[in-house]
Image: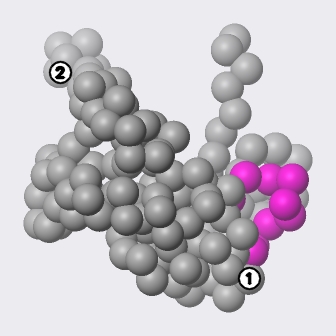
Amino acid sequence: QFDARLLLNTTPAIYHQIREQGYKPAGLHLNGRLLNEVQQRPLPTDEILSVSCHSLQDIEQASKLAADCLLYSPIKPTHSHPEAEPLGWQAFADAVAASDICSYALGGMQLEDIEQAHRLGGQGIAAISCLWPPLDDATG
């Protein structure tokens, strides 16, 4: 209904299996572990490659893979990864400055963080909980 395009957060092998079955996702998202296991861009340049980055070394790897966008995290404390040490806004600014890849802040983001991400040169935020509240247990 909304003509939404889907990026799959999976391995390159599973992504290619899905494509072989005739499905046409917009692209692939690599988590931090997969980002550092892949040696070359795992899909054609007309498909979107997004990556999770947690350090400047990850950003270098994203650049080698010609990633189209990166999610830099965690910027702030987050409920989904409470053990992760927040990197902070200065680290996000450094990440944006170190790369020409469009960058999104992730981790503990709220709607009001969009402006901060823009001020620091990012494209915006990536978020789930502030945009998509959990379903009420009574409604499933």
Near mark 2 (Cα within 10 A), the count class, few <14, some 14-19 or many ≥20, is: few
Expressed as whole percent of the image width and height from the top left, the position of residue 84 reads 17, 66
Left or right: residue 112 compared with residue 93: left
Left or right: residue 126 compared with residue 80: right
Q: Give me the residue at 21% from left, 44% from top.
A: 108
Left or right: residue 2 compared with residue 60: right
| Residue type, mark 2 in image | Asp
What residue is pinned by disc 2? Answer: 137
Quadrant containing the N terminus in the rendered view: top right
Q: Give me the residue at 26% from left, 59% from top.
A: 90
One can see residue 103 in this view:
yes
Q: Is residue 49 magenta?
A: yes
- In the structure shown, which secondary structural element does the residue marked by tag 2 occupy? loop
Q: Give me the residue at 55% from left, 66% from top.
A: 99
Quadrant containing the C terminus in the rendered view: top left
Near mark 1 (Cα within 10 A), the count class, few <14, some 14-19 or many ≥20, is: few
Q: Give, as a single range, the part of the protein colored magenta.
A: 41-50
What residue is pinned by disc 1? Answer: 40
One can see residue 13 in this view:
no
Q: Give me the residue at 75% from left, 74% from top.
A: 41
Expressed as whole percent of the image width and height from the top left, the position of residue 82 reads 12, 58
Determine the image quadrant of residue 55.
bottom left
Q: Looking at this view, is 13 or 132 the one in front?
A: 132
* Magenta portion: prevailing SS class: loop
| Residue type, mark 1 in image | Gln
